[in-house]
Image (cartoon, rainbow, N blue to C red):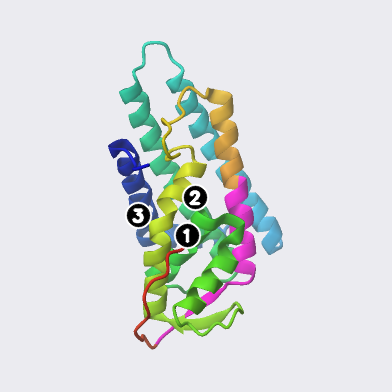
Amino acid sequence: MHATPAHAAIGQRIVAAVEEGVHQRWGPALLRAATADGTSVDGRVQAVTAGFRQELGVAGAAAGGASAVPGVGLATTSAAFALELAWSTVRLTDLVLTIAALHGHRDATVEERRLWVLSILTYGDGATSMVTKLASELGGGLGGSAGRSVPAETVRQLNKAIGVAIVTRYGTRRGALAVGRAIPFGVGAALGYGLNSYMVKATARHADAFFASLPVRVDSIPTAATEVPDPR
């Protein structure tokens, strides 16, 4: 079934939020990582994650509570949900970038940062294996192993491919783009808090695993890539 205009608009917000994050939030993420509490990478990741869980949980509670207020129309609650989704996606991008820096990945191009965020938000705990698989199919020469350098053009092609999938995969998990269903408003403050809190915890876990064995790094010499596979 085709996406509705409302779904398409929310998809655009997701993509725009990721772009804002990878372009404008790298500096703050580096600073956040440098000042994080803890004496180990694991401890710092846990401390950073706890702060994000509280922040996004409260925002989710506010959005969920507003949707249940009598007299508030669907258009109003839809707009509020879309705004909260865009903002929380930026903050999840902040979380991913911060965890990257905590793992020592502090020197990255915009394309690399985009790949990190798109992969983790789209594929979750399967991000490492999916990026490795797609890079191999694109001619990156990974041979099924992680941590290898690939041409910059391959990374751009990876981002193009994964960008097609993020709206339906990540959007559906956020309850925004379930095919053939209306956006599930009226979930209430408690559920709104819980869903956002869970999303932060899951994203942090996926990012932690992804950056512990970063699947690809950018080669400084760009070469042409092959046709983009469909990752959906």
Q: CA distance from mark 2 to mark 3?
A: 12 Å
Q: Give the labeled residue for mark 1.
A: 117
The amino acid at mark 1 is Val
Residue stretch rendered in magenta on the structure: 201-220
Would you say the magenta stretch is mainly helix, strand or loop? helix
Let me know if residue 91 appears in the view: no
Residue 34 vs residue 50, the one in the foreground: 50
Image spot of residue 82 (x, y percent): 37, 36
- Asked which secondary structure carries label 3, the reply is helix
Q: Is residue 206 above or below residue 215?
A: above
Image spot of residue 25 (x, y percent): 41, 57
Q: Are marks 1 and 2 in contact (CB under 8 Å)?
A: yes
Q: Is residue 148 above or below residue 160?
A: below
Residue at 45% of width from left, 73% of height from top? 108
Q: Give the labeled residue for mark 2.
A: 92
- Residue farthest to the front? 1
- Disc sitting over residue 153 in the figure: none
Residue at 53% of width from left, 32% of height from top? 58
In the displayed structure image, the side of residue 74 where residue 117 appears, left or right: right
Q: Are marks 2 and 3 in contact (CB under 8 Å)?
A: no
Residue 26 vs residue 179, the one in the foreground: 179
Image spot of residue 128 (x, y percent): 58, 67
Q: Tag 2 or tag 1, which sits nearer the N-term?
A: 2
- Disc sitting over residue 20 in the figure: 3
- Asked which secondary structure carries label 1, the reply is helix
Residue at 48% of width from left, 77% of height from top? 137
Q: Is residue 209 magenta?
A: yes
Q: CA distance from mark 1 to mark 3?
A: 11 Å
Q: Is residue 35 magenta?
A: no
Residue at 49% of width from left, 41% of height from top? 174
Task: Kindly report which numbered mark, 1 or 3, lies closer to the viewer in this rendering.
Answer: 1
